[in-house]
Image (cartoon, helix red, strand yellow):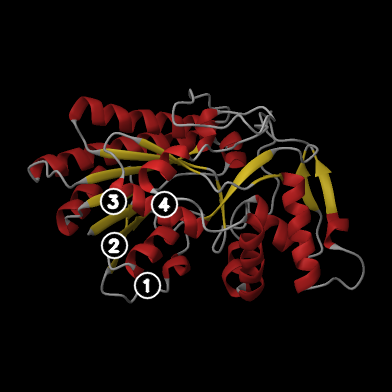
């Protein structure tokens, strides 16, 4: 199968690219190379004859038409997006332009390409989204997001992703475009851009800086190892039912405070401080505006229909992640110099 992966130089997209190439798929990586992208993420496959790179923006219709005509993919996996909630609070316009207008432009290019090709039955447009579109959950562990949960986005980021989800469904119902959708929980693992909670905690700890935790640290997330997620995404693409959505979760709920303390304990073992614990660097800071209390995925559909479940516990995944950052300073050090990285964002009133 030949895949066009948008956002393939990003965190989740690059994991999909690496896994797809390893499984023998031809992959065209389309990426605009904005601040959070890094071609080093796909360096391991860059020389592979199954891999090609196209530097383009999903808002550029002419570029999309050219790339689709030149490469003739069997499927599109749409992962290109602005994804950092704090940045969306400070600059929501960029999120609307990329996540909403960009998805619309890609859908129109895909529809035209699919139509010109005679509407092949095997074509797929896989839209990759987030569980944040569902809003916030109460602390009751029995209550989780299912595919039937009503949308209730609370941040500019989640609102832009909810809008893109609705566009994808509309293009399926109105024009017949063969789509599948997926909504995932919080990802983590190697190549995670150093502005998100887990890499920020690891790198701030190593630098002797404060480890900022929003509010009282009670916000709960379901943590999904990125390589597990890539595996699930390829499965949904290949075997998911057309027009259907699949929630992908790690089945690993932890509060932010629990998560940071776990990271500190791992670092205490792997690279001990001269005195005390890295947990001594934990600092509570003003909460993010509109911070959702809890996310958790009900994985029943993907488990029963496609037979998928995560392979990695959060403890195993965090061990691997910490070790990866310890071993790959050459990757993360240059990224810390990019605009806004390491700064507290998302405090605009």
Q: Earlier in the sequence, mark 2 or mark 1?
A: 2
Residue 269: % across, % down: 79, 71
Q: Are marks 4 and 1 in contact (CB under 8 Å)?
A: no
Q: Earlier in the sequence, mark 3 or mark 4?
A: 4
Q: Secondary structure at mark 4?
A: helix
Residue density around tag 1, few if under 14, some if 14–19, many if 20 or more, within 10 Å: some
Q: Secondary structure at mark 1?
A: loop
Q: Is residue 121 above or below residue 294?
A: below
Q: Earlier in the sequence, mark 2 or mark 3?
A: 2
Mark 2 or 3, which is nearer the eye? 3
**Residue for badge 4:** 232
Q: Earlier in the sequence, mark 1 or mark 3?
A: 1
Residue located at (66% from left, 38% from top) = 346
3D distance between C-alphas at marks 4 and 2: 17 Å
Give residue 81's quadrant in the image: top left
**Residue 57 appears in the rendering:** no
Placement of the C terminus among the 4 image quadrants: top right
Q: Secondary structure at mark 3?
A: helix
Mark 1 or 3, which is nearer the eye? 3
Q: Secondary structure at mark 2?
A: strand
Q: Is residue 71 above or below residue 348?
A: below
**Residue for badge 3:** 238
| Residue 108 circle label | none
Placement of the N terminus among the 4 image quadrants: bottom left
**Residue for badge 2:** 27
| Residue 45 circle label | 1
3D distance between C-alphas at marks 2 and 1: 10 Å
Residue 179: % across, % down: 27, 38
Residue located at (57% from left, 30% from top) = 155
Q: Are marks 2 and 3 in contact (CB under 8 Å)?
A: no
Q: Are marks 1 and 3 in contact (CB under 8 Å)?
A: no
């Amino acid at each position: 199968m030949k895949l066009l992966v948008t956002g393939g130089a990003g965190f989740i997209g690059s994991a999909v690219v690496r896994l797809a190439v390893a499984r023998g798929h031809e992959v065209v990586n389309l990426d605009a190379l904005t601040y959070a992208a890094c071609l080093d993420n796909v360096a391991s496959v860059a020389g592979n004859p199954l891999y090609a790179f196209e530097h383009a923006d999903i808002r550029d219709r002419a570029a999309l038409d050219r790339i689709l005509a030149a490469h003739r993919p069997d499927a599109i996996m749409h992962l290109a997006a602005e994804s950092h909630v704090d940045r969306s609070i400070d600059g929501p316009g960029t999120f609307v332009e990329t996540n909403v207008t960009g998805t619309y432009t890609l859908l129109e290019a895909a529809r035209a390409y699919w139509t010109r090709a005679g509407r092949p039955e095997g074509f797929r447009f896989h839209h990759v989204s987030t569980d944040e579109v569902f809003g916030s959950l109460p602390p009751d562990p029995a209550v989780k997001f299912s595919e039937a949960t009503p949308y209730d986005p609370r941040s500019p980021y989640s609102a832009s992703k909810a809008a893109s989800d609705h566009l994808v469904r509309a293009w399926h119902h109105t024009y017949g475009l063969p789509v599948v959708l997926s909504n995932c929980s919080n990802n983590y693992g190697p190549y995670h851009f150093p502005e998100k909670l887990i890499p920020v905690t690891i790198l701030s700890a190593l630098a002797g800086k404060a480890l900022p935790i929003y509010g009282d640290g009670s916000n709960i997330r379901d943590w999904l190892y990125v390589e597990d997620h890539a595996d699930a995404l390829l499965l949904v693409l290949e075997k998911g039912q057309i027009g259907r959505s699949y929630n992908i979760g790690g089945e690993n709920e932890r509060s932010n405070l629990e998560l940071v303390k776990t990271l500190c304990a791992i670092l205490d073992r792997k690279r001990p401080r001269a005195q005390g614990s890295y947990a001594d660097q934990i600092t509570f800071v003003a909460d993010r505006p509109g911070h959702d209390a809890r996310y958790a995925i009900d994985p029943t559909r993907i488990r029963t229909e496609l037979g998928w479940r995560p392979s990695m516990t959060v403890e195993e995944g965090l061990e691997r992640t910490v070790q990866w950052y310890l071993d790959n300073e050459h990757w993360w050090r240059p990224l810390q110099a990019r605009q806004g990285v390491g700064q507290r964002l998302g405090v605009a009133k």
